[in-house]
Image: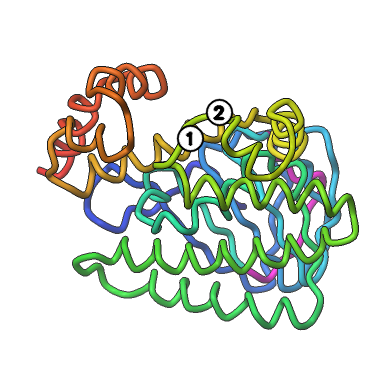
Amino acid sequence: MINPHRLVLNDNTDKYAFSIERYENQILNCQSPTRLFHNRILFVEKGYGTISIDDYVFSIGDNRIFLMAQDQIVQWEMDLMMTGYELNFDEFFWEKAPASASNCKSVLFDNAAVNQLLQLNHSDFGEIQPTFSALWMEHLKKDYINKADVLAAYLKIMMIKIANVNATLKEGFDSYEYQQYRKFYNQISNDFMVSHEVDYYAAELNISARKLTAICKRYSGKGAKELINRQLMAEAKRHLQFSTNPVKDIAYYLRFATPEQFSHFFKKNASQSPSHYRSYLVKTDM
């Protein structure tokens, strides 16, 4: 049976959680409700049975993708069979993916219930399946320097492809507001150093800040300001992890007025100071 606690670490540290499993006509036994420790993508090439995610029951079928976010409750309703892949990853591993993919991941997983099941047509299946296969083959290789970075790059490609399929499936269904939501995410990625304020992005979309917040809550379950802050935190963590720049330089780069303002922001959102966060990463690399 699929084990949500089983994770394979690929860079010889305990910082990142990532795993990918291949199933070939495998019977998965019924399991009790389990809270996921990490984000999960279930790519079903062929299969049958049912799966319960939170309060919803879905049928396992051919050419389907199931997206499950950390802390969701998952249970097999009955014995099922599947051929395909199960992929798990945590936020630390995701930070290895370049920033340009963050908006795609956020659109899919911030409110996973909206995107829980994606039914793929033949063309979309043919587009995505080789990426899973390539990721699986890379995962099987003997560990080498930067292997986790390569796996994260494959994950980025996969997330972008799935997000594009998701956007196509939603075309024509409340498309105007959904496209505004997607545009907002793109703007955060491009303009997070220009402004940290909701009013700025709302003006760019020619809507009110209240309307933008309502749209964000509808599609992600989070307000516009919270999503802006998430982007800033992701950028801050990347700089603290992958650069040796002083904290004050990172603060000014991210357009905070003072290093103290940045430290207060970071501590509020990460429950630790930027210096402590960087120190933890250095210790786990030793």
The magenta-colored residue range is 73-84
Asked whether 177 or 111 is in front, the reply is 177
What is the quadrant of residue 223 in the picture?
top right
The image shows residue 261 at horizontal and vertical percentages of 30, 19
Q: Answer few, some or many: residues within 10 Å of disc 2's Cα (few below 14, many 20 plus, some between 14 and 19).
A: some
Residue at image point 77% right, 44% down: 114
Q: Report the amino acid beneath label 1.
A: Arg
In this view, 143 is above or below 4: below
Q: Which quarter of the image is occupied by the C terminus?
A: top left
Residue at image point 65% right, 35% down: 72
Magenta residue check for 80: yes
Magenta residue check for 173: no
The image shows residue 149 at horizontal and vertical percentages of 31, 63
* Left or right: 114 as drawn, with respect to 129: right
Q: Label 1 to label 2, Cα distance in Å?
A: 6 Å
The image shows residue 93 at horizontal and vertical percentages of 38, 49
Q: Report the amino acid beneath label 2.
A: Glu
- Evaluate whether residue 272 shows in this view: yes
SS class, disc 2: helix
The image shows residue 64 at horizontal and vertical percentages of 76, 65
* Left or right: 203 as drawn, with respect to 3: right
In this view, 276 is above or below 147: above
* Left or right: 57 as drawn, with respect to 33: right
What is the quadrant of residue 8 in the picture?
bottom left
In this view, 228 is above or below 79: above
Residue at image point 68% right, 45% down: 205
Q: Which mark is residue 226?
A: 2
Asked whether 38 or 263 is in front, the reply is 263
> Which residue, given by chain and number where applicable, does mark 1 sit on?
230
* Left or right: 138 as drawn, with respect to 190: left
Residue at image point 18% right, 32% down: 247
Q: Answer few, some or many: residues within 10 Å of disc 1's Cα (few below 14, many 20 plus, some between 14 and 19).
A: some
